[in-house]
Every structure is written in C-alpha cells, then in structure tokens.
Image: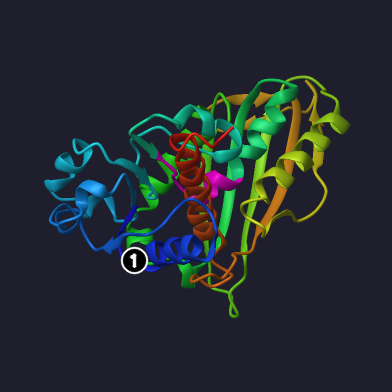
C-alpha cells in the first residue's frame, strides 16, 4: 500500500499501520500522485490512501483510478460513497474507491444510525468543536467541503432524512480534546432505554478501533408536544423526541497530538477499513 501526502494525517496513518501487527504494510509515502505513478514498483501497490487536498490533485489522478489500485480518500471531498466501519464496511469489500470523510462524520454517523434503530430520524445535527491548533490551513480553507461531506454522511449512512454539520474552532490553551454534540429528532415517544442501550453499544463498537471515543455524559431526551413544538430552521415546527448525545474523542497520539481527535477518527477508520479489505482479499476475513 502507499500513502499519498506526507503531512500530519498521512504520517499518523503510516505510524498506526507500522505499529500494528495487521495485514497492511507501507511500501511508499509520496507527496503527489505523479510521483507515485513514476515509482518502478507502482504495479505492486494495490491500495492507496489519499490524504491530499482535493484541489491539489493533478491530471495524473485519472491514471491512478484506471490503474486497478484501490483508493481510500481521507479528505472532506464532497464526492464518493462514505464508509463508516461500524455501519457499512462490508459494502466496500470489492469496490475500487471509497470515502472516509470527516472525523466529525465518523463520530456522529454511528450515533444517528443507532438512534435510527428505534424510528426514522427526521433530522440529525452534529456540532463539532476541535482545537484550533489542529486545524491546518487546508482544513480552514475546506470548511464548506467539511459541512457538505459531514451532512451528506449523516443522511447517506446515518439514515437521517436531513443532516446538518457545524464546526467550531476552539482557541483554548492548552488545547482541548475534540467534542461533538449530536442531536437527532424522532417522531413520537420511542423507548428511551432501548435508544440509550443502542447508543452505548455503538460507542463500544467504535471504541474498538478508536479507543479514545467515548460518551461524555448520559444520553439526554426531551419531548416536544403540539402545544410547545420545537422550531427547526427550514423545516418548521417539530413534535416528537429530541435525543442529545455528547461525545469526546481523544486521539491515540501515534503522531498527531492527543487533542486532534477528529483527525484520529479519520486515520483510525481508514486503517480499520483497509485491514478489512485486505483480509477479505486474502481470503482470511469473515
């Protein structure tokens, strides 16, 4: 496998892979696709992680997609199918490309999906606060892509009818860990104990590949009736139940700092996805 992009995200991913005893090995880390295509052993590379900004991709990208190598996109690009390991990993066993998306999406989508087991989530919103020190210039320039990609993931994978994402950059010093608050709206008054148990189980599943992913406090519920509905912008008054889930993600600090939990969500999800694909390709996966 190869890693496109030698920045902090690509380096963290490479360190994660080298520290593990899984089926992956890093053959190359290069700054661009043209450099990768020029490598004499490129034909032996079957999996490429792309951590470069979409705007930096050159014309050589078409040649990469036609080469037969699978690609895993770790950026907030607004195209491609989203893969969230605990939700739809098996859908990507044989696909040529997939999209990991944002750390905010990787954190919030499993929660929306868990809540959706009890009914249709008519609206899902995530408010993600990250340390400003962990937001590189490309991240700041790509806020629009972040919002679009995360909102799309909440709908496409999380199952929400509508999705919204908000990103907050915290100037706190020392930097604080990533925190996400996920709001989901369901019609009626579903079984709260069942929803909370499903969320706790989902958090445990995610924490198997992102150990620093956890609930910050117990799940909160609020019911809105016809006499006092909740007003939702662009949707109007809502009656039903709002579920609020507060998450904290502390990174593993393999290369990225521990407070960059949103980036650790991305690299950990990419590694888990690639390992599953590799095991399936080798005939040893379930």
Q: Is residue 8 above or below residue 220?
A: below
The percent coordinates of residue 57 (x first, y second) are 20, 51
Q: In this figure, which residue is indicated by the disc labeled 1? A: 137
Q: Secondary structure at mark 1?
A: helix
Labels in figure, total: 1
Q: How is the image coloured?
A: rainbow
The percent coordinates of residue 120 (x first, y second) are 66, 20
The percent coordinates of residue 165 (x first, y second) are 52, 43
- The residue at the point 53 percent across, 59 percent down is 264
Q: Quadrant of the C terminus?
A: top right
Looking at this view, name the residue that lies furthest to the bottom. Answer: 174
Query: Would residue 8 be counted in the magenta stretch?
Result: no
Q: Is residue 55 above or below residue 82?
A: below
Q: Is residue 231 visible?
A: yes
Residue 143 horizontal side relative to residue 41, left or right: right
Residue 250 position by quadrant: bottom right
Residue 198 position by quadrant: top right
The percent coordinates of residue 191 (x first, y second) are 86, 25
Residue 254 horizontal side relative to residue 114, left or right: left
Q: Is residue 108 above or below residue 236?
A: below
Q: Is residue 136 above or below residue 79?
A: below
- The residue at the point 13 percent across, 47 percent down is 60
Local crowd at mark 1 within 10 Å, few (<14), some, or many (≥20)?
few
Looking at this view, name the residue that lies furthest to the right. Answer: 193
Tell which of 116 and 35 is nearer to you: 35
- The residue at the point 12 percent across, 56 percent down is 38
Q: Which residues are magenta?
A: 99-107
Q: Is residue 239 visible?
A: no
């Amino acid at each position: 496998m190869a890693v496109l992009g030698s920045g902090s995200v690509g380096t963290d991913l490479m360190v994660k892979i080298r520290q593990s005893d899984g089926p992956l090995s890093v053959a190359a880390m290069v700054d661009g696709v043209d450099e990768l295509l020029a490598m004499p052993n490129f034909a032996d590379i079957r999996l490429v992680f792309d951590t470069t900004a979409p705007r930096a991709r050159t014309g050589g990208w078409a040649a990469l997609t036609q080469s037969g190598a699978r690609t895993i996109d770790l950026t907030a690009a607004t195209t491609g199918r989203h893969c969230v390991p605990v939700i739809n990993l098996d859908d990507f066993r044989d696909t040529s490309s997939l999209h990991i998306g944002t750390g905010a999406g990787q954190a919030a989508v499993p929660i929306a999906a868990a809540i959706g087991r009890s009914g249709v989530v008519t609206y899902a919103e995530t408010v993600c606060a990250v340390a400003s020190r962990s937001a590189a210039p490309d991240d700041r320039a790509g806020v629009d892509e972040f919002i679009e990609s995360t909102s799309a993931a909440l709908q496409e994978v999380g199952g929400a009818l509508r999705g919204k994402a908000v990103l907050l950059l915290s100037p706190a010093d020392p930097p604080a860990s990533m925190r996400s608050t996920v709001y989901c709206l369901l019609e009626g008054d579903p079984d709260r104990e069942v929803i909370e148990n499903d969320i706790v189980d989902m958090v445990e599943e995610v924490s198997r590949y992102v150990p620093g992913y956890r609930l910050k406090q117990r799940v909160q519920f609020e019911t809105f009736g016809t006499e006092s509905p909740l007003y939702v912008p662009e949707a109007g008054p809502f009656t039903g139940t709002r579920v609020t889930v507060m998450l904290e993600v502390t990174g593993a600090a393999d290369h990225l700092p521990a407070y960059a939990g949103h980036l650790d969500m991305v690299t950990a999800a990419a590694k888990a996805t690639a390992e599953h694909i590799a095991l399936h390709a080798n005939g040893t996966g379930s």
